[in-house]
Amino acid sequence: MSPTDATDETAVAPVYAPSTEAVGGRHAKPASRSAKVNRRGLSGLAGGELERWLAAEGQPAYRARQIRDAIWRQNVETAAEMLTLPAPLRARLDEAFRIDTIAEDEVKIADSGMTEKTLHLLADGALIESVLMHYPARGFVGQARPTHRERHTLCISSQAGCAVGCPFCATGELGFGRDLETAEIVDQVRHAARRLAGTGSHLTNIVFMGMGEPLLNLDRVLEAVEILSDPRHFGLGARHVVVSTSGVVPGIRRLTALGPQFTLAISLHAARDPLRDVLVPLNRRWPVAEVVAAAREHARVTGRRVSYEYVMISGVNDTEIDADALAWLLRDDLAHVNLIPMNPVAHTPWQASTPERVAEFAARVRRGGVGVTIRANRGQDAGAACGQLAADRAGEPPAPAVAHRRESIERQSEVALRGSRSSESLSSELEAAVRSGAVR
């Protein structure tokens, strides 16, 4: 959460302010920032807000259904396309709201069309990313039905940039811009659905694992999940939604109290505090045992298995000691581990673990009684790492800054591998985020 108010859309770090000409591609539309920034996104209205606005405008209640159909069934980009509405109401909607909060898209295709990574330009110049991954149906020859149905999974962002600063993540290099408003979150889904509609397909899964820490923008994320799962809106069941966190314990506890049906994912990446302090700086505020205890309680209360994400970094967190620590930490829990080879990220000294090492690590964790899946990297030739397209757009940082970052990472990881916890405090940016009152 930004130190500024979450609704202040003008508080954006300079790195997120390219010209509108800098981003172009499919579904590109001209952006007039001064006219658009201060209007709410129409797709983000929930909980009767649209009905109340229409009543204040003297409009009949059935107009709400027509507007929702235009947004979520017809997936319109402009008010002019809402042909079931009278022209004066279309004009009034255009004055009061942004029909689409995303000004432009730049789409990069990878993996022979199986991965589509999109850089979204928002009305105020902020850049965010989403990734659409296609998984064909799989099964044995001769089967009447496939054992695995066709899936189309969209990974979306909840913030512009991120304050957590994980050193293996490209978004961490960018720093924190601002929280996204609800409409800016769900409009990423609308844009992907629009592309899929041209192929006769539809989204089957949504994961909040893009740019940002979802639980530091929890109110907006919960509103987005409600809209995406509401049959009157997008209509995707909550069980097809995954919300991740790097370990914001108050946010996990708040989710537990709400009892959601979506899946909670923990970006773990290390089971030992000294190492996790380096890989996930938020660990210095909420240590790994506290994070896992909160997740364990969440699984007990909701009955939903918790997913643990673990990026595999060669020689850093892929040792036998780390595998045993992970198995011990999650023993007897309603949990599953996803091992993900690290995507190449500029300005870090690390490389992904080899496939052989990942397989050995997985086997050792399984012998400890914990379920494991090895995830394949997707979209490396399209800048697959979270935040990489936005980082590329921001430009290469000065060489001294790159060298300082690498030296700092190497120094901290060497200390951690000796078993000593980091003496460094949270960055001022992250400290402000966790103290802002976003998690309570």
Image: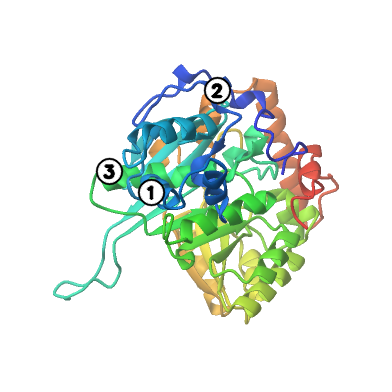
**Label 1 vs label 3: CA separation?**
38 Å
User: What type is the residue that disc 1 sits on?
Assistant: Gln
Secondary structure of residue under mark 1 = helix
Looking at the picture, tell me which residue is in the foreground, 182 or 166. 182
Residue assigned mark 1: 66
Residue at 26% of width from left, 66% of height from top?
A: 138
Disc ID at residue 105:
none
Q: CA distance from mark 3 to mark 2?
A: 39 Å
Residue matched to label 2: 35
Q: Is residue 161 above or below residue 396?
A: below
Q: Earlier in the sequence, mark 3 or mark 2?
A: 2
Q: Which mark is residue 112?
A: 3
Question: Which amino acid, by three-letter code, is at mark 3?
Answer: Ser
Does the CB distance between marks 3 and 2 fall below 8 Å? no
Q: Picture coordinates of residue 299 (x, y %)?
A: 62, 75
Of mark 1 and mark 3, the one earlier in the sequence is 1
Which residue is found at the position 82% from the left and 55% from the top? 420
Residue displayed at 79% across by 40% down:
427
Which of the pair 430/270 is nearer the observer?
430
* Residue found at the very far front of the displayed protein: 58
Where is residue 210 drawn, in percent x and y? Answer: 53, 46
Choose top left, top right, bottom left or bottom right for residue 265: bottom right
Q: CA distance from mark 1 to mark 2?
A: 25 Å
Callout in the foreground (3, 2): 2
Q: In this picture, is 109 found above or below 341?
A: above
Mark 2: amino acid:
Ala
Foreground: 262 or 330? Answer: 262
